[in-house]
Image (cartoon, rainbow, N blue to C red):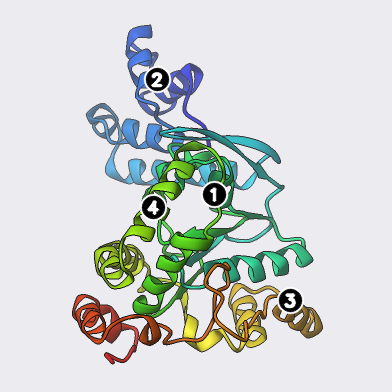
Amino acid sequence: MGNANLEDIRAAYRIFLRREPENEEVMKELLQSDVDAHHLIRIFMGSREFKESFSQELATFFELTAFEILELRDYNVAPGHVMLRTTHGDFECYLASPGDFLSFYAFGLHKAGSSLLVGMLSAALERRGIPYVNTSDHAFEAGMQHDSLINPEDAYFRYGYGYIGFRGFPSYLKRFDLKHNKKIILIRDPRDMLVSYYFSMRYSHINPGGGVVSAEIKRLRSEATQIPIDQYCIEKSTTFLAEFASISHLLGTDVRLYRYENVIYMKSEWLSDMLNYLGIELPPAEIEDIAHLNDIRPERERLEQHIRQVAPGNYHKHLKAATINRLNEIFCHVLRKFGYAMG
């Protein structure tokens, strides 16, 4: 949903205040604040003039009517490319025609199997012809920081899409009320996440070859080459604590949470459970096929490969006992909350 234009603002004056705007300058001030239609409604319905003009009962009724109209607008999305803006540049994202369902979301934390989640879920959605959007990958390919998205309203709608590809909970999603949307979350033992992140940054993480993301990956690679793994994991622990914190507000809503350790060797059962939760039917043979295509289990650890190894508890092999103890202290609340041993 794009920003409001002068005609939108003029219409808001007529609908909510039942009059014409004072002058063009007043409308231009609103225009310069880059408000979208949702925010425009809130501005006018929160104004003293509106509240004094209508009784509370009528105002409440009017508000419901206004947002019902906006939901209809959200539902009737025209397919095509949309231009998404970030603080460092723009990138394109294609929106197919929306489906007939409440939009759902799939979140994976960094190095928690998020690529596996995206790979399996996107394959299932494609086979069923269900429209999905992955703005994170589009941003990465363009070399842009996904979390700095300025106009998510142009790509995120209440109805009709599966939104996948997130690593953590991006701050721009705080603009939307997601408590009634179905949400999948994939987590992992943070100690294994840190070790995986170290090897990924040092050896295997792909570089889009341009933009601010390319420069950041080069910096992170240089950092990982110069710092011993134990020191690196402790220094990066705050970043991963923040990722766990970013999803905490979702846990009391309509959410299905999975631990990497419980699903990595049971991919077909995992995919079947996710699809059942989302209300998506797919023949068992197709579920098995998708799981088989994504069931990569290296016989030995491959330090320079994206899928280095998949066994849980790999941090024991690479970290000193003192480092593990320190990480246990740092992540004690996370480990207890999600049922991970302190060893």
> Which of label 1 and label 3 is nearer to you?
1
Among the two numbered marks 2 and 4 on one chain, the one whose residue lies closer to the N terminus: 2
Kindly identify which numbered label has been placed on residue 207: 1
> Which of label 2 and label 1 is nearer to you?
1
Real-space Cα separation, disc 4 to disc 3, in angstroms: 33 Å
Question: How far across and down, in percent of the image, does residue 211 sit?
Answer: 50, 37
At a point 53% along the width and 62% down the height, the residue shown is 204
Q: Nearer the viewer, residue 124 or 200?
A: 200
Mark 2, residue position: 31
Q: Secondary structure at mark 3?
A: helix
Kindly identify which numbered label has been placed on residue 222: 4
Say if mark 1 contacts mark 3, CB within 8 Å.
no
Kindly identify which numbered label has been placed on residue 293: 3
Residue 166 in view of the camera: yes
At a point 37% along the width and 68% down the height, the residue shown is 250
Amino acid at pointer 4 = Ser
Real-space Cα separation, disc 1 to disc 3, in angstroms: 25 Å
